[in-house]
Amino acid sequence: MKFIVIHVLWFSSWCLLNLGWIPGIEPFDPFPFFLLSLAVSVEVSFLTIFLLMNQNSMNRQAEQRSHLELQVNILAEQEATQTLQMIRRISEHLGVEVEDLNTEQRELEKKTDVHELHTRIKDTLPDK
């Protein structure tokens, strides 16, 4: 909000000074305010550069967060797989009868191949 207020005051002052409405002050940039247009154009260029730099930085941070989330998810999946395997072994050791494992349960107990998963995801994602 401070940025907007400063700009409104700046442009209002510029226009008042250069419209000749204030007695004793000679306009230095008469209407249509070419110097003001030049200053605004330069400011827009710099603001655009700063905005793009900030956006670039935010994209890098988002990529790092995504990579970290992927690593955490892979670790969580490995832990879940090991937990399922331990529960099956404990059940077998204690002689607890477990209903026949269906295909999905067997798949969950298998170690996930990260490279194969990456290839599968890459193949299903649409090309840019």
Image: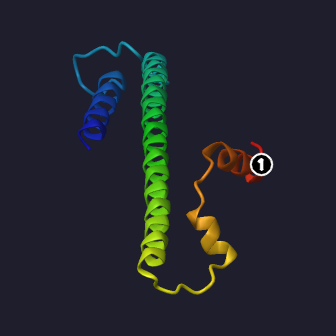
State how many labels appear.
1
Q: Is residue 55 above or below residue 18?
A: below
Q: Percent position (x, y) of residue 110?
A: 60, 60
Q: Residue at x 44, y 31 (%)?
A: 51
Query: Could you tell me which quadrant the N terminus lies in?
Result: top left
- Horizontal side of 43 relative to 106 (left or right) equals left
Of the pair 27 and 50, the residue shown nearer to us? 50
Dot 1 falls on a residue whose secondary structure is: helix
Q: Percent position (x, y) of residue 119?
A: 72, 45
Q: Residue at x 63, y 83 (%)?
A: 100
Q: Residue at x 42, y 73 (%)?
A: 90
Of the pair 20 and 54, the residue shown nearer to us? 54
Of the pair 45 and 61, the residue shown nearer to us? 61
Q: Quadrant of residue 19?
A: top left
Query: Could you tell me which quadrant the C terminus lies in?
Result: top right
Three-letter amino acid code of the residue under disc 1: Asp
Q: Is residue 116 above or below residue 32?
A: below
- Horizontal side of 10 relative to 107 (left or right) equals left
Q: Residues within 10 Å of mark 1 (few under 14, many from 20)?
A: few
Of the pair 109 and 9, the residue shown nearer to us? 109
- Horizontal side of 33 relative to 120 (left or right) equals left
- Horizontal side of 115 relative to 2 (left or right) equals right
In the rendered view, how is the structure colored? rainbow
Q: Is residue 106 above or below residue 75?
A: below
Q: Percent position (x, y) of residue 14?
A: 32, 25
Q: Percent position (x, y) of residue 77?
A: 49, 57
Q: Residue at x 60, y 53 (%)?
A: 112
The residue that label 1 is drawn on is: 123
